[in-house]
Image (cartoon, helix red, strand yellow):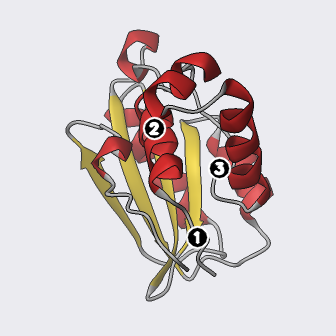
Amino acid sequence: MSVAIDNIDVLILRQLIKDARTKRRDLAKMCGISSTAVTNRIEKLTTKGVIVGTGLYYRFSKLGFVLAASIEVENFKIGEEKSVIEKMKEYTNVLVRSYTVGKNNCTFFIVARSTKDVENLKQFLLKHSYTGNININFWTKTNFLFDNIEIEPSGA
């Protein structure tokens, strides 16, 4: 279900996408409203589920994780993810798990220190009965482009 937003909500959302740490008083100046009004709008957007939180992004390579990859798993048994992710931590770090529609019904986004770690993870997954074929896609550069999303006022 869509949430109705106006031009001021759009300005607030666009700025928070650029920098979620923007001070409310700075948002107020940008929007031409009071800090209290900004706070009320952010609370409304949060209550309606438009804003669900903020995140921290960092360069994985600076921490030794030089590879980013998505691993698509065929016939993954739903309900097994917690134990699988715990075991996967021995080889890599799982950042995202997403259930998908189609032949490969589960995708993991991981960061790893080496191709050997990814290969060991693949072999671990292949040994278990809750997986079928596995496709691995290495990412050459990972950039989240949230500021690329076009937000427009709506009357939903």
In this view of the protein, which residue sits in the foreground, 24 or 33? 33
Residue at label 2? 17
Gap between marks 1 and 3, in whole Å?
13 Å
Q: Amino acid at mark 1?
A: Ala
- Disc number for residue 4: 1
Closer to viewer: mark 1 or mark 3: 1
Quarter where residue 25 is shown: top right
Where residue 128 appears, as percent x and y from the top left, is: 64, 67
At x 42%, y 22%, the residue is 60
In this view of the protein, which residue sits in the foreground, 75 or 102? 102
Q: Does residue 110 appear left or right of residue 152 in this picture?
A: right
Q: Amino acid at mark 3?
A: Ile
Quarter where residue 7 is shown: bottom left
Residue at label 3? 51
Sequence-first disc among 2 and 3: 2
Vertical comparison of 80 with 86: above or below: below
Gap between marks 2 and 1, in whole Å?
18 Å
Which class describes the residues within 10 Å of circle 2: few (<14), some (14-19), or many (20+)?
some
Vertical comparison of 25 with 139: above or below: above
Sequence-first disc among 2 and 1: 1
